[in-house]
Amino acid sequence: MKKVTLKLTALVMLLGGAITVSYAQNDLNVVTSAVPFLRISPDARSGGMGDVGIAVAPDANANYANIARTPFSTSKAAIGINYSPWLRDLSVNDVFIASLAGFVKLDDQQAISASLRYFKLGNIQFTDQAGNDLQQYNPKEFAIDLGYSRKLSSKLSLGIAIKYINSNLTGNFNNGGQNYKAGSSVAGDLHLYHQGTNESGQGFNWGVTLSNLGSKMSYSKDATQKDYIPANLGVGVAYTKVFDEANKLSFALDLNKLLVPTPPKLSNGADPAGDSAALVKYRDRSVASSWLHSFGEGDGLNEEIQEITAAIGAEYWYNNQFGFRAGYFYENANKGNRKYFTVGASVRYSVATLNFSYLFPTGNGINRNPLSNTYRFGLVFDFPGGN
Protein backbone atom coordinates (compact mmCIF):
# COMPACT_ATOMS: atom_id res chain seq x y z
CA MET A 1 0.00 0.00 0.00
CA LYS A 2 1.34 3.39 -0.93
CA LYS A 3 2.02 5.84 1.85
CA VAL A 4 0.98 9.43 1.37
CA THR A 5 3.66 12.03 2.00
CA LEU A 6 2.57 15.62 2.50
CA LYS A 7 4.93 18.43 1.63
CA LEU A 8 2.97 20.17 4.35
CA THR A 9 4.92 18.21 6.97
CA ALA A 10 7.91 20.55 7.12
CA LEU A 11 5.66 23.57 7.50
CA VAL A 12 3.62 21.96 10.27
CA MET A 13 6.76 20.94 12.14
CA LEU A 14 8.17 24.46 11.93
CA LEU A 15 5.01 25.75 13.56
CA GLY A 16 5.10 23.13 16.30
CA GLY A 17 2.51 20.90 14.68
CA ALA A 18 2.03 17.16 14.59
CA ILE A 19 3.00 15.33 17.75
CA THR A 20 6.53 14.00 17.58
CA VAL A 21 8.91 11.97 19.71
CA SER A 22 12.66 12.06 20.18
CA TYR A 23 15.40 9.57 20.79
CA ALA A 24 17.21 9.13 24.07
CA GLN A 25 20.54 10.47 22.85
CA ASN A 26 18.99 13.72 21.65
CA ASP A 27 18.22 16.54 24.10
CA LEU A 28 15.68 17.99 21.67
CA ASN A 29 12.19 16.97 22.82
CA VAL A 30 9.61 19.45 21.64
CA VAL A 31 6.15 19.43 23.23
CA THR A 32 3.86 19.62 20.22
CA SER A 33 0.18 19.40 19.39
CA ALA A 34 -2.41 19.57 16.66
CA VAL A 35 -3.63 22.99 15.40
CA PRO A 36 -0.52 24.94 16.48
CA PHE A 37 -1.95 28.04 14.76
CA LEU A 38 -3.86 28.63 18.00
CA ARG A 39 -0.50 29.51 19.57
CA ILE A 40 0.12 32.26 17.00
CA SER A 41 -1.11 35.67 18.05
CA PRO A 42 -2.76 37.38 15.06
CA ASP A 43 -2.85 40.72 16.90
CA ALA A 44 -0.52 43.30 15.31
CA ARG A 45 -0.32 45.31 18.54
CA SER A 46 0.74 42.27 20.57
CA GLY A 47 3.08 41.24 17.75
CA GLY A 48 5.08 44.45 18.20
CA MET A 49 5.70 43.63 21.86
CA GLY A 50 7.12 40.12 21.53
CA ASP A 51 3.59 38.63 21.57
CA VAL A 52 2.71 39.73 25.12
CA GLY A 53 -0.98 40.33 25.79
CA ILE A 54 -2.26 38.77 29.02
CA ALA A 55 -2.11 41.89 31.20
CA VAL A 56 -1.79 44.84 28.80
CA ALA A 57 -4.53 47.47 28.46
CA PRO A 58 -7.74 46.07 26.92
CA ASP A 59 -8.56 46.44 23.24
CA ALA A 60 -10.61 44.79 20.48
CA ASN A 61 -8.17 41.86 20.19
CA ALA A 62 -8.40 40.83 23.86
CA ASN A 63 -9.99 37.52 22.76
CA TYR A 64 -6.62 36.14 21.69
CA ALA A 65 -4.80 36.64 25.00
CA ASN A 66 -7.17 37.46 27.86
CA ILE A 67 -10.86 38.06 27.33
CA ALA A 68 -11.32 39.18 30.94
CA ARG A 69 -9.77 42.55 30.05
CA THR A 70 -12.79 43.74 28.06
CA PRO A 71 -15.04 45.01 30.93
CA PHE A 72 -12.30 47.53 31.78
CA SER A 73 -12.23 49.00 28.28
CA THR A 74 -13.02 52.71 27.97
CA SER A 75 -14.88 51.92 24.73
CA LYS A 76 -18.47 50.76 24.53
CA ALA A 77 -17.56 48.43 21.66
CA ALA A 78 -14.60 47.69 19.42
CA ILE A 79 -13.72 45.73 16.28
CA GLY A 80 -10.25 44.51 15.31
CA ILE A 81 -9.06 43.21 11.92
CA ASN A 82 -5.59 41.66 11.49
CA TYR A 83 -3.60 40.18 8.62
CA SER A 84 -0.24 38.40 8.80
CA PRO A 85 1.68 37.01 5.81
CA TRP A 86 3.48 33.96 7.20
CA LEU A 87 6.88 32.29 6.71
CA ARG A 88 8.05 34.85 4.16
CA ASP A 89 11.68 34.06 5.02
CA LEU A 90 11.12 30.59 3.50
CA SER A 91 9.91 32.16 0.22
CA VAL A 92 6.35 31.05 0.98
CA ASN A 93 3.94 33.50 -0.64
CA ASP A 94 0.51 31.92 -0.16
CA VAL A 95 0.39 31.32 3.60
CA PHE A 96 -1.30 33.84 5.87
CA ILE A 97 -3.30 34.33 9.05
CA ALA A 98 -6.33 36.63 9.09
CA SER A 99 -8.56 37.44 12.02
CA LEU A 100 -11.64 39.39 13.02
CA ALA A 101 -12.50 40.12 16.66
CA GLY A 102 -14.64 42.41 18.72
CA PHE A 103 -16.67 43.03 21.84
CA VAL A 104 -19.71 44.90 23.05
CA LYS A 105 -20.13 46.01 26.65
CA LEU A 106 -23.60 45.29 27.98
CA ASP A 107 -22.98 47.75 30.80
CA ASP A 108 -20.06 48.89 32.94
CA GLN A 109 -19.79 45.42 34.50
CA GLN A 110 -19.97 42.92 31.65
CA ALA A 111 -19.22 42.33 27.98
CA ILE A 112 -19.68 39.76 25.25
CA SER A 113 -16.95 39.01 22.72
CA ALA A 114 -16.43 37.01 19.56
CA SER A 115 -13.58 36.29 17.17
CA LEU A 116 -12.64 34.38 14.06
CA ARG A 117 -9.09 33.42 13.08
CA TYR A 118 -8.35 31.82 9.73
CA PHE A 119 -5.08 30.17 8.73
CA LYS A 120 -4.48 29.44 5.03
CA LEU A 121 -1.56 27.10 4.43
CA GLY A 122 -1.13 27.62 0.70
CA ASN A 123 -1.11 25.00 -2.04
CA ILE A 124 0.15 21.54 -1.03
CA GLN A 125 1.15 18.77 -3.42
CA PHE A 126 0.34 15.21 -2.28
CA THR A 127 2.85 12.58 -3.36
CA ASP A 128 3.32 8.88 -2.80
CA GLN A 129 6.42 7.33 -1.24
CA ALA A 130 8.20 7.34 -4.60
CA GLY A 131 7.57 11.06 -5.07
CA ASN A 132 4.88 10.70 -7.73
CA ASP A 133 2.30 13.50 -7.72
CA LEU A 134 -1.17 12.45 -6.63
CA GLN A 135 -3.23 15.59 -6.16
CA GLN A 136 -3.09 19.14 -4.87
CA TYR A 137 -5.02 20.72 -2.03
CA ASN A 138 -5.26 24.04 -0.23
CA PRO A 139 -5.20 23.24 3.51
CA LYS A 140 -6.91 25.63 5.86
CA GLU A 141 -7.70 25.93 9.55
CA PHE A 142 -10.02 28.19 11.49
CA ALA A 143 -11.34 28.80 14.99
CA ILE A 144 -14.49 30.63 16.07
CA ASP A 145 -15.09 31.66 19.66
CA LEU A 146 -17.76 33.37 21.72
CA GLY A 147 -17.03 34.76 25.16
CA TYR A 148 -18.51 36.49 28.18
CA SER A 149 -16.61 38.53 30.74
CA ARG A 150 -17.68 40.25 33.95
CA LYS A 151 -16.17 42.34 36.71
CA LEU A 152 -16.02 40.57 40.06
CA SER A 153 -14.98 43.77 41.81
CA SER A 154 -13.78 47.26 40.90
CA LYS A 155 -10.37 45.79 39.96
CA LEU A 156 -10.91 42.08 39.20
CA SER A 157 -12.71 40.41 36.29
CA LEU A 158 -13.36 36.91 34.95
CA GLY A 159 -13.85 35.78 31.37
CA ILE A 160 -15.01 32.52 29.82
CA ALA A 161 -15.15 31.52 26.16
CA ILE A 162 -16.07 28.53 24.08
CA LYS A 163 -14.52 27.87 20.68
CA TYR A 164 -14.95 25.58 17.71
CA ILE A 165 -11.77 24.53 15.91
CA ASN A 166 -11.57 23.04 12.42
CA SER A 167 -8.41 21.82 10.67
CA ASN A 168 -8.71 20.55 7.11
CA LEU A 169 -5.23 19.54 5.94
CA THR A 170 -6.12 16.84 3.41
CA GLY A 171 -9.52 17.59 1.90
CA ASN A 172 -11.01 14.18 2.76
CA PHE A 173 -8.23 12.48 0.83
CA ASN A 174 -8.45 8.70 0.33
CA ASN A 175 -5.38 6.66 -0.53
CA GLY A 176 -4.89 2.92 -0.37
CA GLY A 177 -7.85 2.43 1.91
CA GLN A 178 -6.74 5.09 4.39
CA ASN A 179 -9.32 7.83 4.73
CA TYR A 180 -8.21 11.28 5.85
CA LYS A 181 -10.67 13.86 7.06
CA ALA A 182 -10.87 17.29 8.59
CA GLY A 183 -10.13 17.38 12.29
CA SER A 184 -12.36 19.29 14.68
CA SER A 185 -12.52 20.06 18.36
CA VAL A 186 -14.50 22.08 20.88
CA ALA A 187 -12.56 23.89 23.60
CA GLY A 188 -12.99 26.44 26.34
CA ASP A 189 -10.99 29.31 27.87
CA LEU A 190 -10.96 30.64 31.43
CA HIS A 191 -9.33 34.04 32.01
CA LEU A 192 -8.70 36.22 35.07
CA TYR A 193 -7.58 39.85 35.00
CA HIS A 194 -6.70 42.38 37.70
CA GLN A 195 -6.46 46.05 36.74
CA GLY A 196 -4.53 48.06 39.29
CA THR A 197 -4.11 51.27 37.33
CA ASN A 198 -5.44 54.56 38.66
CA GLU A 199 -7.65 57.09 36.85
CA SER A 200 -4.68 58.44 34.88
CA GLY A 201 -3.80 54.93 33.67
CA GLN A 202 -0.72 54.43 35.84
CA GLY A 203 -0.28 51.23 37.81
CA PHE A 204 0.20 47.47 37.79
CA ASN A 205 -1.98 44.86 36.05
CA TRP A 206 -1.80 41.08 36.11
CA GLY A 207 -3.65 38.17 34.55
CA VAL A 208 -3.89 34.38 34.50
CA THR A 209 -5.29 32.38 31.57
CA LEU A 210 -6.23 28.80 30.78
CA SER A 211 -6.75 28.43 27.04
CA ASN A 212 -7.76 25.71 24.55
CA LEU A 213 -9.03 23.27 27.15
CA GLY A 214 -10.77 20.82 24.85
CA SER A 215 -11.09 17.48 23.14
CA LYS A 216 -8.37 15.73 21.16
CA MET A 217 -8.29 16.00 17.37
CA SER A 218 -8.06 13.25 14.77
CA TYR A 219 -7.47 13.39 11.02
CA SER A 220 -8.56 9.80 10.37
CA LYS A 221 -11.12 7.25 11.58
CA ASP A 222 -8.42 5.51 13.64
CA ALA A 223 -9.45 6.15 17.25
CA THR A 224 -5.88 5.60 18.45
CA GLN A 225 -4.50 8.45 16.31
CA LYS A 226 -5.87 11.44 18.20
CA ASP A 227 -3.62 14.38 19.04
CA TYR A 228 -3.84 16.86 21.87
CA ILE A 229 -4.74 20.44 21.08
CA PRO A 230 -2.51 23.20 22.54
CA ALA A 231 -4.02 23.68 26.01
CA ASN A 232 -2.04 26.43 27.69
CA LEU A 233 -1.43 28.07 31.06
CA GLY A 234 -0.40 31.72 30.89
CA VAL A 235 0.60 34.30 33.49
CA GLY A 236 1.17 37.94 32.65
CA VAL A 237 2.05 41.23 34.35
CA ALA A 238 2.18 44.80 33.06
CA TYR A 239 3.12 48.17 34.50
CA THR A 240 2.28 51.58 33.04
CA LYS A 241 4.04 54.83 33.95
CA VAL A 242 2.21 58.03 33.04
CA PHE A 243 4.63 60.96 32.77
CA ASP A 244 2.08 63.60 31.81
CA GLU A 245 -1.04 63.96 29.70
CA ALA A 246 0.89 63.30 26.50
CA ASN A 247 3.41 60.61 27.46
CA LYS A 248 3.03 57.14 28.93
CA LEU A 249 5.18 54.01 28.85
CA SER A 250 4.19 50.39 29.57
CA PHE A 251 6.22 47.25 30.21
CA ALA A 252 4.76 43.73 30.07
CA LEU A 253 5.91 40.15 30.67
CA ASP A 254 4.08 36.92 29.74
CA LEU A 255 5.05 33.38 30.73
CA ASN A 256 3.32 30.45 29.00
CA LYS A 257 3.43 26.68 29.35
CA LEU A 258 1.66 24.14 27.17
CA LEU A 259 -0.58 21.78 29.15
CA VAL A 260 0.41 18.92 26.85
CA PRO A 261 2.47 15.93 28.08
CA THR A 262 6.12 15.70 27.08
CA PRO A 263 6.49 13.07 24.32
CA PRO A 264 8.38 9.91 25.34
CA LYS A 265 12.01 9.53 24.31
CA LEU A 266 12.38 6.48 22.11
CA SER A 267 15.23 4.02 21.86
CA ASN A 268 15.99 4.44 18.13
CA GLY A 269 14.99 0.85 17.44
CA ALA A 270 16.81 -0.72 20.39
CA ASP A 271 13.56 -1.53 22.22
CA PRO A 272 10.62 -1.62 19.76
CA ALA A 273 8.23 -3.15 22.28
CA GLY A 274 9.07 -0.54 24.89
CA ASP A 275 8.73 2.28 22.36
CA SER A 276 5.32 1.00 21.26
CA ALA A 277 4.10 0.75 24.85
CA ALA A 278 5.33 4.25 25.63
CA LEU A 279 3.51 5.72 22.63
CA VAL A 280 0.28 3.91 23.47
CA LYS A 281 0.45 5.20 27.05
CA TYR A 282 1.18 8.70 25.79
CA ARG A 283 -1.80 8.80 23.43
CA ASP A 284 -4.29 6.96 25.64
CA ARG A 285 -4.44 9.56 28.41
CA SER A 286 -7.69 11.42 28.89
CA VAL A 287 -7.72 15.14 28.16
CA ALA A 288 -7.92 16.15 31.84
CA SER A 289 -5.19 13.68 32.75
CA SER A 290 -2.94 15.10 30.02
CA TRP A 291 -3.13 18.56 31.61
CA LEU A 292 -1.92 17.18 34.94
CA HIS A 293 0.78 15.01 33.36
CA SER A 294 2.14 18.02 31.48
CA PHE A 295 3.76 19.01 34.78
CA GLY A 296 5.04 15.60 35.83
CA GLU A 297 6.86 14.12 32.85
CA GLY A 298 10.22 14.66 31.20
CA ASP A 299 13.53 14.79 33.05
CA GLY A 300 12.49 16.64 36.18
CA LEU A 301 12.25 20.27 37.18
CA ASN A 302 14.87 21.47 34.72
CA GLU A 303 12.87 20.22 31.74
CA GLU A 304 9.66 21.68 33.16
CA ILE A 305 11.35 25.08 33.30
CA GLN A 306 12.60 24.64 29.72
CA GLU A 307 8.99 24.22 28.56
CA ILE A 308 8.08 27.76 29.68
CA THR A 309 8.19 30.44 26.98
CA ALA A 310 8.79 34.07 27.92
CA ALA A 311 7.73 37.24 26.12
CA ILE A 312 8.66 40.76 27.17
CA GLY A 313 7.52 43.97 25.56
CA ALA A 314 7.28 47.74 25.91
CA GLU A 315 4.78 50.24 24.52
CA TYR A 316 5.06 54.04 24.38
CA TRP A 317 2.20 56.37 23.50
CA TYR A 318 2.45 60.04 22.65
CA ASN A 319 -0.72 62.06 23.04
CA ASN A 320 -2.75 58.85 22.56
CA GLN A 321 -2.16 59.25 18.83
CA PHE A 322 1.21 57.70 18.08
CA GLY A 323 2.39 54.43 19.58
CA PHE A 324 5.78 52.68 19.39
CA ARG A 325 6.60 49.15 20.58
CA ALA A 326 9.45 46.67 20.97
CA GLY A 327 9.68 43.17 22.37
CA TYR A 328 11.49 39.87 22.60
CA PHE A 329 10.25 36.26 22.62
CA TYR A 330 12.24 33.35 24.04
CA GLU A 331 11.82 29.59 23.80
CA ASN A 332 14.41 27.08 24.99
CA ALA A 333 16.50 25.45 22.24
CA ASN A 334 15.39 21.97 23.34
CA LYS A 335 11.72 22.93 23.10
CA GLY A 336 11.52 24.57 19.68
CA ASN A 337 14.13 27.36 19.81
CA ARG A 338 11.87 30.24 18.76
CA LYS A 339 13.75 33.43 19.59
CA TYR A 340 13.00 36.77 17.98
CA PHE A 341 12.89 40.55 18.43
CA THR A 342 9.89 42.58 17.37
CA VAL A 343 9.03 46.22 16.78
CA GLY A 344 5.72 47.91 16.12
CA ALA A 345 3.94 51.21 15.67
CA SER A 346 0.44 52.67 15.73
CA VAL A 347 -1.32 55.72 14.38
CA ARG A 348 -4.69 56.67 15.85
CA TYR A 349 -7.17 59.04 14.23
CA SER A 350 -10.65 59.49 15.65
CA VAL A 351 -12.12 56.00 16.24
CA ALA A 352 -9.60 54.15 14.03
CA THR A 353 -6.14 52.85 14.96
CA LEU A 354 -3.70 51.36 12.45
CA ASN A 355 -1.22 48.88 13.96
CA PHE A 356 1.92 47.43 12.38
CA SER A 357 4.54 45.01 13.69
CA TYR A 358 7.66 43.34 12.33
CA LEU A 359 9.60 40.29 13.49
CA PHE A 360 13.36 40.71 13.09
CA PRO A 361 15.52 37.95 11.57
CA THR A 362 17.48 35.86 14.06
CA GLY A 363 20.22 33.29 13.51
CA ASN A 364 22.26 32.54 10.42
CA GLY A 365 22.28 29.81 7.79
CA ILE A 366 20.42 26.68 8.87
CA ASN A 367 19.85 28.24 12.29
CA ARG A 368 17.93 31.17 10.82
CA ASN A 369 14.51 31.50 12.42
CA PRO A 370 11.74 30.47 9.98
CA LEU A 371 9.58 33.22 11.45
CA SER A 372 12.05 35.91 10.35
CA ASN A 373 10.69 38.84 8.35
CA THR A 374 7.15 38.18 9.54
CA TYR A 375 4.97 41.25 9.69
CA ARG A 376 1.43 41.93 10.84
CA PHE A 377 -1.10 44.62 10.00
CA GLY A 378 -4.10 45.50 12.13
CA LEU A 379 -6.95 47.96 12.10
CA VAL A 380 -8.99 48.66 15.23
CA PHE A 381 -12.22 50.66 15.50
CA ASP A 382 -13.20 51.90 18.96
CA PHE A 383 -16.70 53.15 19.61
CA PRO A 384 -16.90 55.48 22.65
CA GLY A 385 -19.32 55.21 25.51
CA GLY A 386 -17.55 52.84 27.94
CA ASN A 387 -16.60 53.47 31.56
Image: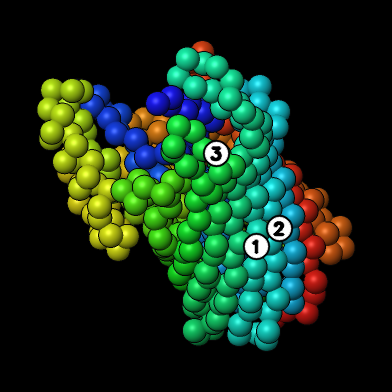
Q: Residues within 10 Å of mark 2 (few under 14, many from 20)?
A: many
Disc 3 from disc 1: Cα separation: 29 Å
Q: Which residue is painted at 62% across and 28% down in the image?
A: 135
Q: Position of residue 214 (x, y in %)?
A: 42, 62
Image quadrant in which you'd find residue 176: top left
Q: Nearer the viewer, residue 314 or 35?
A: 35
Q: Where is residue 90 in the image (x, y as percent from the top left)?
A: 61, 22
Disc 1 to disc 2: CB gap under 8 Å:
yes
Per the image, the residue denoted by label 1 is: 115
Label number found at residue 66: none
Camera sees residue 142: yes
Instruction: State which tag comes first along the sequence, 3 or 2.
Output: 2
Q: Is residue 332 left or right of residue 132?
A: left
Disc 3 to disc 2: CB gap under 8 Å:
no
Per the image, the residue denoted by label 3 is: 173
Per the image, the residue denoted by label 2 is: 100
Q: Is residue 108 left or right of residue 78?
A: left
